[in-house]
Image (spheres, rainbow, N blue to C red):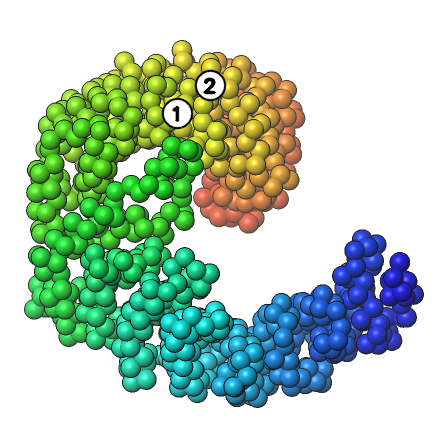
């Protein structure tokens, strides 16, 4: 055992600790001995509210002769202490005298050489600044300005990092006085920061071109400068583009980005510096996008440069050489924002537009989006950005469920293809006449059957069909989908070659898109046959799942006919159930189960002959989905429809249903917040459809008062469940729960609204019919309150 660890076991009284005592605790806090770690944690927790403790902690941080891990723990401890105790109104808050001792000495640590400690210091100074700048710490920003202009590279880097966190903290304050203070500070910082940004950017270009080792560090500084400027420009100035300094800055941004793209392309692709250079470029693009969002009517001088910039880099062969995915995504989103900007849309009668800037913006957009430019954008989007990429196809082959999960997931929205789809939609909606003629012409030129050997041709056809599906509502009167489906699409669906899986899946998706737009009911049987064939286990899994989703869309359509669907019920249910058993991911099971649930809901009692296998499967699925509450919600929802479909036969499922309902409505279970709504619906359905009661079903009622105590929003369905019990088993219910229920209502009714009281009186009325003596013995107070 080390000497310092032995000493730690004999610490002096906490009321008289010294620097050395604090040091020993911190040393124990980074030891490998779990006993000492626990002791250190407890002691630090006790001492953190003691006067002077953080001054001692600061002494440890500032002593560079100590072990790095000890100093780092001290910095983290001080950071946590600032969060809890620096605020003036905080319980056990630090004294003003202690704060006054710590603040000036913080500035002496700006040049901290150890990265992980410098990071903690920068963050904690930012936290102090949120409370103390400008009134209690006016020296901070001048000191940081001196630091960022220093000739010492380390001090410059640390000062920039610290200033970034200070600005980030101050910019997050929302009170009017705080906003005003931040605007005043931004005004002071803007010029020096623009100078530093320009110097570092020029230095970055020089060092990268000369392949200097210092380029990595300089790129890092440039990134921080850009982040600081973004906060200052966008949040620190009320109307940024009325400020001549910011206007000049905005005008040169495009050239700066262009230069960075060129040096990246020539010198950095494939090197360790490339990732940081991408970050630097993206941060500059973010400033342009933020300026548009903040001041659209003042953005007019930048509209045409922005549109040209996007077109040059995203939609030309030359520009695409410099593009990387995130950059292209940001530029597409910038163009989309310019197209959709509400402030740039004139009145339907243009002469009635009152805002001059709106008219100017509209003219600029019309001057840019000419028919020839729209044609360029259209063919590039459909021909280059909408087709599936090799990476996506590999994911499809290797992990089809993950492919579908990623394609519909949150992060997928920010990848290239969905952004291209979103931009395509925006352009098509805004300039529908030209875009519609372009799309129809492209379809007309691509009617011939594509050979299964021509995989690139298949991908091109897939992209065209994707475009047609995205804008299906816009093409309502332009395309005879019934004829197209009956001829070309059916022919392509019959091709079973492996390469054609891409088109089979896309056509199935396309049918789903057009089902709610314009699809004859007479063709629905043909569609059902096609979908059921594609849901068979001989087919690719992605195609099968897409077919299941399109079937859900068709069943959810206004024109859906249960009678027309009945010949396909047995096979479709069987195919879906087989699919549910085959897939592995909970998200995939959730989607398939939702289709099954909708089908059972629509066909009702007709599902009885086919549902046995599913009923046997659901208990195992319930147990396997313990960590997936959304899947459990879907299971319960499906059970609701099964119970309604089976009617009185659902009582046979009680051994499974009652524990599920108990768990879903048990307010002591953390999962109940996800499951309780569906659980109450299942409870209501089971009681309503049960021919007889059982002790377990009656015992379930114990959960209901606790549910109603938790939230009044469940009062309506709670009263419905009570009345269902009174119809099902009036004597047993009144004997076990009559008096407690009345007592519960008497206690709660005073806080209820009139609608709630009416619901409660409905239950009471039914209870009186079951037991008339209640009217005199226990109901009177409730009725008297209602009469008031």
Q: CA distance from mark 2 to mark 1?
A: 10 Å
Q: Nearer the viewer, residue 428 or 617?
A: 428
Residue 94 is left or right of residue 722, and the answer is: right
The x, y position of residue 133, in whole percent, is: 55, 82
* Vertical side of 212 occupied by 35: above or below: above
Crowd tier of the residue under label 1, counting other residues whose Cα lies within 10 Å: few below 14, some 14–19, many 20 or above: many
Check contact, mark 2 vs mark 1: CB within 8 A. yes
Measured as percent of width and height from the top left, residue 2 is found at: 87, 62
Q: Which residue is mark 1?
A: 596
Residue 553 has which mark? none
> Are there few (<14), some (14-19), or many (20+) residues within 10 Å of tag 2?
some
- In primary-sequence order, the first of circles 2 and 1 is 1
Identify the residue at horizontal 87%, vertical 66% (top origin).
Answer: 4
Q: Nearer the viewer, residue 131 or 725?
A: 131
Q: Which mark is residue 614?
A: 2
Q: Is residue 694 left or right of residue 519?
A: right
């Amino acid at each position: 055992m080390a000497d310092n660890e032995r000493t730690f076991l004999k610490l002096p009284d906490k009321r008289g600790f010294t620097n050395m005592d604090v040091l020993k605790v911190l040393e124990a806090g980074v030891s490998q001995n779990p006993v000492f770690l626990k002791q250190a944690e407890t002691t630090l927790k006790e001492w953190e509210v003691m006067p002077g403790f953080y001054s001692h902690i600061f002494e440890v941080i500032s002593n560079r002769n100590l072990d790095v891990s000890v100093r780092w723990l001290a910095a983290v401890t001080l950071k946590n202490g600032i969060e809890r105790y620096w605020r003036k109104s905080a319980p056990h808050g630090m004294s003003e005298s202690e704060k006054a001792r710590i603040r000036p000495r913080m500035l002496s640590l700006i040049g901290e050489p150890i990265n992980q400690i410098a990071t903690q210091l920068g963050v904690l100074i930012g936290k102090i600044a949120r409370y103390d700048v400008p009134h209690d710490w006016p020296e901070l920003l001048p000191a940081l300005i001196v630091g960022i202009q220093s000739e010492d590279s380390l001090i410059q880097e640390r000062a920039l990092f610290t200033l970034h966190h200070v600005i980030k903290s101050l910019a997050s304050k929302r009170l009017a006085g705080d906003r005003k203070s931040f605007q005043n500070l931004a005004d002071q910082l803007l010029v020096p920061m623009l100078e530093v940004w320009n110097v570092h950017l020029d230095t970055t270009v020089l060092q990268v071109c000369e392949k200097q080792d210092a380029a990595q560090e300089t790129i890092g500084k440039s990134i921080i400068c850009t982040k600081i400027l973004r906060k200052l420009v966008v949040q620190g100035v009320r109307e940024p583009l009325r400020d001549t300094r910011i206007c000049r800055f905005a005008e040169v941004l495009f050239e700066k980005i262009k230069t960075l793209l060129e040096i990246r392309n020539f010198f950095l692709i494939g090197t360790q510096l490339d990732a940081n250079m991408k970050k630097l470029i993206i941060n500059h693009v973010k400033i342009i996008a933020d300026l548009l969002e903040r001041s659209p009517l003042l953005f007019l001088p930048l509209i045409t440069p922005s549109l040209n910039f996007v077109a040059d880099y995203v939609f030309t062969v030359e520009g695409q050489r410099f593009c990387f995915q995130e950059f292209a995504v940001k530029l597409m989103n910038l163009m989309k924002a310019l197209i959709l900007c509400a402030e740039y849309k004139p009145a339907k009668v243009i002469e009635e537009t009152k805002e001059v800037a709106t008219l100017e913006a509209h003219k600029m957009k019309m001057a840019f989006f000419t028919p020839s430019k729209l044609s360029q954008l259209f063919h590039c989007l459909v021909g280059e950005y909408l087709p599936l990429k090799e990476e996506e196809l590999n994911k499809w082959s290797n992990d089809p469920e993950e492919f579908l999960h990623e394609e519909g997931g949150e992060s997928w929205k920010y990848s290239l293809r969905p952004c291209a789809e979103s931009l395509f939609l925006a352009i098509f909606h805004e300039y529908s006449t030209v875009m519609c003629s372009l799309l129809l012409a492209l379809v007309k030129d691509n009617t011939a059957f594509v050979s299964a050997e021509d995989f690139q041709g298949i991908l091109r056809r897939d992209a065209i069909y994707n475009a047609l599906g995205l804008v299906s509502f816009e093409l309502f009167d332009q395309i005879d989908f019934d004829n197209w489906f009956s001829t070309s699409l059916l022919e392509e669906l019959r091709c079973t070659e492996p390469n054609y899986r891409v088109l089979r899946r896309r056509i199935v998706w396309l049918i789903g898109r057009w089902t709610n737009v314009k699809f004859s009911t007479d063709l629905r049987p043909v569609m059902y046959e096609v979908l059921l064939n594609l849901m068979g286990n001989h087919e690719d899994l992605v195609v099968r799942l897409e077919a299941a989703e399109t079937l859900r869309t068709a069943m959810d359509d206004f024109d859906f006919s249960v009678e027309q669907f009945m010949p396909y019920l047995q096979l479709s249910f069987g195919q879906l159930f087989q699919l549910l058993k085959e897939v592995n991911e909970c998200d995939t099971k959730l989607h398939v189960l939702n289709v099954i649930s909708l089908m059972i809901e629509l066909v009702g009692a007709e599902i009885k002959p086919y549902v046995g296998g599913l009923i046997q499967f659901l208990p195992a699925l319930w147990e396997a989905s313990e960590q997936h509450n959304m899947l459990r919600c879907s299971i319960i929802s499906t059970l609701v429809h099964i119970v309604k479909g089976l009617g009185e036969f659902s009582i046979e499922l009680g051994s499974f249903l009652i524990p599920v309902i108990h768990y879903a409505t048990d307010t002591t279970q953390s999962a109940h917040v996800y499951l309780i709504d569906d659980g109450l619906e299942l409870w209501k359905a089971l009681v309503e459809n049960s021919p007889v009661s059982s002790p377990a079903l009656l015992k379930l009622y114990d959960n209901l008062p606790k549910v109603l105590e938790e939230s009044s929003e469940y009062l309506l369905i709670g009263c419905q469940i009570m009345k269902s019990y009174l119809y099902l088993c009036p004597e047993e219910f009144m004997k076990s729960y009559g008096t407690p229920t009345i007592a519960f209502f008497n206690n709660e009714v005073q806080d209820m609204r009139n609608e709630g009281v009416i619901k409660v009186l409905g239950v009471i009325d039914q209870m009186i019919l079951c037991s008339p003596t209640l009217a005199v013995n226990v109901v009177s107070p409730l009725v008297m309150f209602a009469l008031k």
